[in-house]
Amino acid sequence: MAAVQDYKPGDVPLEEQDDRRLFCKFHYKGVLILLIPILLGPVLIGHPVLVFRFLYISLCLYLYYILNVMARGAVAFIFITFIPISGIAGSGKVSTSYYNDLIFLVYGAVFLGIMMDSSKLSERLAMCVIAIVGSSLKFLQLFMTVAVFIVAFLVHPTLATAFWMKVSQAVITEYNNAGVVKMNSDERTYEVGAKLYPTRPVIGIYLTCCYAGTLAGCLSPFVNPNGSIVDAFWGFFSVTSMMMIMAVPALFGLVVMVFWIQILFLGLFGGSVKRDLAELAGNKAGFKQTIADKKEAMGPWPLYPILVFVLILVTFILAATRKPRVFLGWDDLNLKISSGLSVTAIGMAIVFFALPANYFFCKYYACRRPTKEGTAPSLLSWKAVNNNTPWADIFMLGAAVCCVFCAQACGLNALVAGSMGSPDGKFDSQQFILGALYGTLLTNLSPGTTVAKIALPTMIRGVRSSLCPAVCHGFAQSVFAARELPRKHYCGRLGQYKTVPILASRKCPRDFHVSYNCWLHCFAWQQRNTLILPLT
């Protein structure tokens, strides 16, 4: 603690020494900051010029981030400075991409988690979880897998992960206090004053929450990116078809994730982790008494956590019924304007800041003096938000979103899509694998929803000529077999209504190829410019 208080910005967080041969070890960050742009310089020679300029800037940014040579918050803003200078996109559009709907959803989820800690709701829910799983980390992992998966499937992965991550942190804290699990490792942090590193079992529980939410998003027809993918391929398959396509990979991935984390982080087949947990197993005898004392100290539920829990449930309901796609949601009431999840997240965050945490002051209106005098703070204070929000990580998420936008602006997506077309229009397994690898790369660097909304439409347009026969046949089978083809749809590209022939045949019409390009560019449901009605 004394070392932390004596530390000042600019001090080297290592012991003093006179061995100048260790310069690179102690100051490797400064060396890499200069070395990385120099070594990647030949990338700028490539053609097309804008594409390779974007690749050069992106490689520098992500290497700075991975190697931790600069503060994350500073690395995140590299795109804002160098993308306009490189002539790829204007500063206005680049800056806007940093603060899109997804970023504000993350802000709302972070505020929700901070409010849970402020009201001690996470601690009370942790007591409920401990009553179910006991002191077993393996049971805790299975419980978190199921709980996060269900909420993420029905509501949204981001909100579900933020909620259950706070509960899991509170559970781990109680385990640490009872001596069942060691929460923080003895490894010395590189930066003075930084938070201690968690132990491997704790990391395993946290990763379980993250991966369970991601896999639930892959399967759920209610949330993005599946919703965005269905909108992009509107007419070719429905949300239920998308769910059936992803069911086997998602469930298989969930099983693999559980066992993989059990092996690597929870010591399923032995190892140092299992030995460390065995050493702490003797403390389980007094675990129940420790938890009982904690419950007694907490007492009954006051109004503060109850009100917070109710508002969180309201948030979940609003997010789940926004645009479920299997039935009309409240966002479908106005087809001209889309209300994203940021409307729900930030709207409820405003309520968190507005509502008071206690209502003792109401007794004054009844001419009665409250038993406990004092202020009536809000459910969520800005001081708690300012101190606990991971601003640098959110800025880096904005940079990840901007990466996809810049890939679109410089023409990289169109270039990749154009190179994947098949001249004969047949299925090419090699190009399919390349497309899957490119999509995997983009989703590793950026959120999947952003990739589905920005990059996917370009990829579809780039390969439409080669996929036209197969896509037309599939479209005809799904649409014409149902005998529900709209008479007109609004073409966003032409700015007018396009008439489509009404056919009851199950075969692909001859003139369908003529109208196919217009259909591909401007699905009416995706453009949200007009309501599509079936034949009557």
Image (cartoon, rainbow, N blue to C red):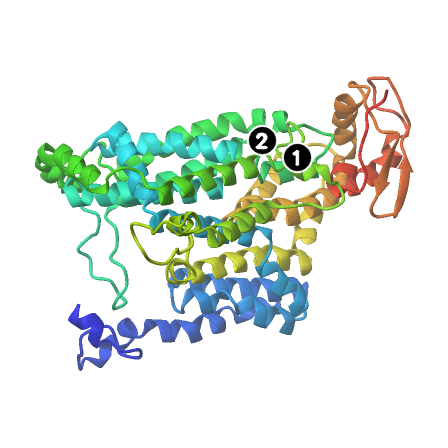
Q: Is residue 161 above or below residue 10?
A: above
- The residue at 19%/38% (across/down) is 296
Q: Which mark is residue 221?
A: 2
Q: In the picture provided, is 294 more to the left or to the right than 108?
A: left
Where residue 491 sits, quadrant-wise, is top right
Residue 409 visible in the shown view:
yes
Q: Is residue 235 left or right of residue 154?
A: right
**Residue projecting furthest to the front:** 367
The residue shown at (50%, 25%) is 248
Residue 462, how many percent across, how many down? 73, 46
- Residue 157 position, x and y percent, is 48, 40
Quadrant hosting residue 341:
top right
For residue 85, what is the image quadrant?
A: bottom right
122 or 491: nearer the viewer: 122
The quadrant the N terminus occupies is bottom left
The residue type indicated by label 2 comes to Pro
Label 1 SS:
helix
The one nearer the camera, 208 or 506, is 208
Residue type, mark 1 in image? Val
Please determine whether, in this image, residue 534 is positioned above or below residue 414.
Answer: above
Q: CA distance from mark 1 to mark 2?
A: 9 Å
Task: Please tell me whether mark 2 sits on a helix, a strand or a loop.
Answer: loop
Q: Which residue is mark 1?
A: 230
Eyeballing the image, is 209 above or below 349?
A: above
Q: Residues within 10 Å of mark 1 (few under 14, many from 20)?
A: many
Label 2: how many residues lie within 10 Å, few (<14), some (14-19) or many (20+)? many
Q: Position of residue 357 (x, y in %)?
A: 40, 50
Cβ atoms under marks 1 and 2 closer than 8 Å: yes
Residue sitting at x 29%, y 38%? 126
